[in-house]
Amino acid sequence: MDANATTPVLPEVQRAMEPFWQEQFGNASSIHQRGQHARAAVDHARESVARLLGCRAAEVVFTSGGTESDNMALFGLLAPDDHLIVSSVEHHAVLHAAQELAERGVQVTFLPCTPQGVVEVSALEAALRPNTKLVSIMLANNETGVLQPVRELADAAHAAGALFHTDAIQAAGKLPLDVKQMGCDLLSLSGHKMYAPQGTGALFVRRNVRLKSMFFGGMHERGRRPGTENVAGIVGLGCAAELARAWLVASGPDSPASLAALRDRLEQGILAAVEQAGVNGGRTNGEPVPRVVNTSNLFFDRVEAEALVIALDLKGLAVSGGSACQSGATEPSHVLRAMGLSEARARASVRFSLSRLTTADEVDAALQIVPAAVARLRELAPKARRASSQLTTNN
């Protein structure tokens, strides 16, 4: 139940990729038949990703993953004295890029969010300046699943003459995406969040938006991303995009609605069985905050998330204390802190993120494992504090 960290490669995706490792291993830039077959496969995958996003195939740039896509969007557009606006709940692929750009002379504003993790349009409008070049706000948060009002934010950016980028890495394959309806100029996605292999990704770049290349070499990807294409990986991403399009309009046991029902069943079952627990980013004014269908971020007071993650892992249940990219970090989640959670509550929060392969039996198993693990850790906590206090006294 850590699908936001990564998803398995679906069997259909693996089968689509296999010929391009040995039988059809050509370089897509070669003009002989093997190269032409590879080029045709890349072009087909580009069209598949374009259909997922509702854009032209020529507007899709293949990358090595979400971090590169995010970095390309920011570094490819901004120069010293330009103004960049990002939210305080972005993934570190955007936040750390923004911090580096600030070191290079770009003016950066970090927008606050509500206690539910939502960036308000009024906050963006107040931050816009005449020299604002780019606004980058994610569509779905990787830790809480909370969705941002991207269309309204994009409209506000455009009204001020700025471009709009959204990190849709945790939304692709979980929500219908249409870049025209969303109003974005750039959009990032990552293959391994949507059942394609790790090391694959894409950046949508609207026609007439000019990006400076981050790398230098050949004229691959229309000169925007030089380097020999990862043909097998790109084919896998294209196949995953086609499977996602079919899943998003499906009904029945393998559909977004069924996954949302499993997520809600897990969430409600845990909260019914565990006291002093709740949902981070759950409701505002009594109404549910829009989230992607697979994600639930829960706090368990008087429990350290790290200890709970380990305890659950020992029982065969994989969850996360936050972004997988921050594993081992000593600081509490920047997302939860930006939402106003205390340090103690942020450190007591765990993310459950289901996949399209999660079953009802697995949810039932989790509903047995989680309450027992939380109760055990709460029982042990006073003993651990007493032992620590005694050790300090003795020393």
Image: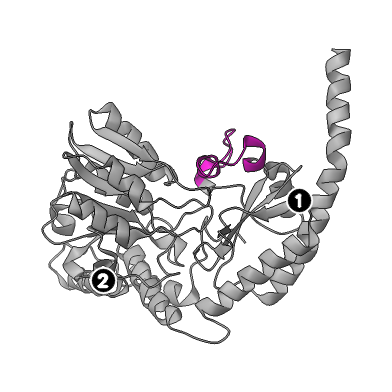
> Split into 4 quadrants, where in the image is the C terminus?
top right
x 42%, y 70%: residue = 175
The answer for how far apart the CA atoms under marks 1 and 2 are is 45 Å
x 44%, y 72%: residue = 14
N-terminal-most mark, 1 or 2:
2
Q: Nearer the viewer, residue 58 or 380?
A: 380
For the record, the magenta segment spans 325-346
Residue 233 position by quadrant: bottom left
User: Eyeballing the image, is 94 above or below 151?
Assistant: above
**Could you tell me residue 348's position as x and y percent?**
68, 44
Q: Is residue 258 left or right of residue 165?
A: right
x 17%, y 43%: residue = 216
**Could you tell me residue 142's position as x and y percent?**
49, 54
* Residue identified by numbered label 2: 50
> Callout 1, which amino acid?
Gln
How crowded pointer 1 is (Cα within 10 Å; few <14, some 14-19, many 20+) is rated as: few
Q: Nearer the viewer, residue 5 or 342?
A: 342
User: Eyeballing the image, is 261 above or below 309?
Assistant: below
User: Eyeballing the image, is 38 above or below 199?
Assistant: below
- Note whether residue 62 is visible: no
